[in-house]
Image (cartoon, grey):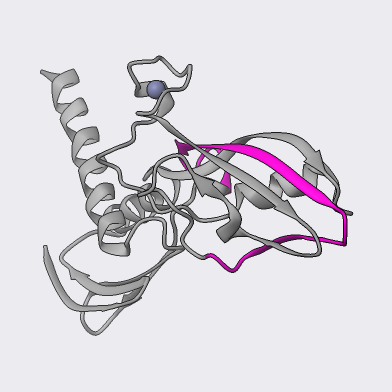
């Protein structure tokens, strides 16, 4: 396998891989979009919602806000020592309290862990008029894109270049994880799957 033409800019990464099969290229792509975990808000408690949007709409919007994820700090709830009950190793909580008038933005979400912030502070969530208030607690946890698209860390595609007999990959992250981290994590997951097969056939 040969890798060349690496171009990295902000949240995008391009590279060319030679001497691999279409099956391998697709396995890598599918693992990146559906198995590399990233944080997303999954549990929302709404104490007060004076805005004109329904609670469900606000919950859905919160789920789609990208969150900076350190995979060394967090584990998937199913693999955590708390067995999925929820603890600081597998989840982080955010509080959102704001009084109108004004727009409620993603940056108004205050995390319990100062390192785990939203990627972009300027995503509008809802608007509040004079006298309206919002008070929400939201829990973010690690998850995988195969369960819900909000846990998909990037959009990944590739094209085949006939002349070079190579696959050109394009990865565009939403910013929760850097694109190179997504590739490295996908390679690790693929390696672990191969090891499992090796164990089973021995
Ligand atoms: Zn846990």
| Picture quadrant where residue 12 is located | bottom left
Which x, y percent locates residue 69?
A: 37, 49
Q: Residue at image x 37%, y 71%?
A: 11
User: Ligand 1 shows up in which quadrant of the image?
Assistant: top left
Residue 157 versus residue 129: which sits nearer the camera? 129
Seen from the viewer's position, the closer of residues 199 and 129 is 129
Q: Is residue 47 above or below residue 166?
A: above
Q: How many marks?
A: 0
Q: Residue at x 30, y 43 (%)?
A: 71
In the rendered view, would you say 109 is above or below 90? Answer: below
Residue 138 forms part of the magenta stretch: yes
Residue 80 vertical placement versus 129 (above, below): above
x, y percent for residue 81? 33, 16
Q: Quadrant of the image for the N terminus?
A: bottom left
Against 28, residue 161 (above or below) is below
Question: Going by the image, does 175 lie left or right of 100?
Answer: left
Question: From which residue to which does the magenta span run?
Answer: 121-149
Q: Residue at x 48, y 56 (%)?
A: 118
- The answer to whether any part of residue 145 appears in the image is no
Instruction: Identify the residue shown where x is 53% and y is 48%.
Output: 110
Instruction: Tell me if residue 25 is in the magenta stretch.
Output: no
Residue 175 position in % (x across, y down) = 42, 62
1, 149: nearer the viewer: 149
Quarter placement of the C terminus: top left
Residue 50 % position (x, y): 86, 48
């Amino acid at each position: 396998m040969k890798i060349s033409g690496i171009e990295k800019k902000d949240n995008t990464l391009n590279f060319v891989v030679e001497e691999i099969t279409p099956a391998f290229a697709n396995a890598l792509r599918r693992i990146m979009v559906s198995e590399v975990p990233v944080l997303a808000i999954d549990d929302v408690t709404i104490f007060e919602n004076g805005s004109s949007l329904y609670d469900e709409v606000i919950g859905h919007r919160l789920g789609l806000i990208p969150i900076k994820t350190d995979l060394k700090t967090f584990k998937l709830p199913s693999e955590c020592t708390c067995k999925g009950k929820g603890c600081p190793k597998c989840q982080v909580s955010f509080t959102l309290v704001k009084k109108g008038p004004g727009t409620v933005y993603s940056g108004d979400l205050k995390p319990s862990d100062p390192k785990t912030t939203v990627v972009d502070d300027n995503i509008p969530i809802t608007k509040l008029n004079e006298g309206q208030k919002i008070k929400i607690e939201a829990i973010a946890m690690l998850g995988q894109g195969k369960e819900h698209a909000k846990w998909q860390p990037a959009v990944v595609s590739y094209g085949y270049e006939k002349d070079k007999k190579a696959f050109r990959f394009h990865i565009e992250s939403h910013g929760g994880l850097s694109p190179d981290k997504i590739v490295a994590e996908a390679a690790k997951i693929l390696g672990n799957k191969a090891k499992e097969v090796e164990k089973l056939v021995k």
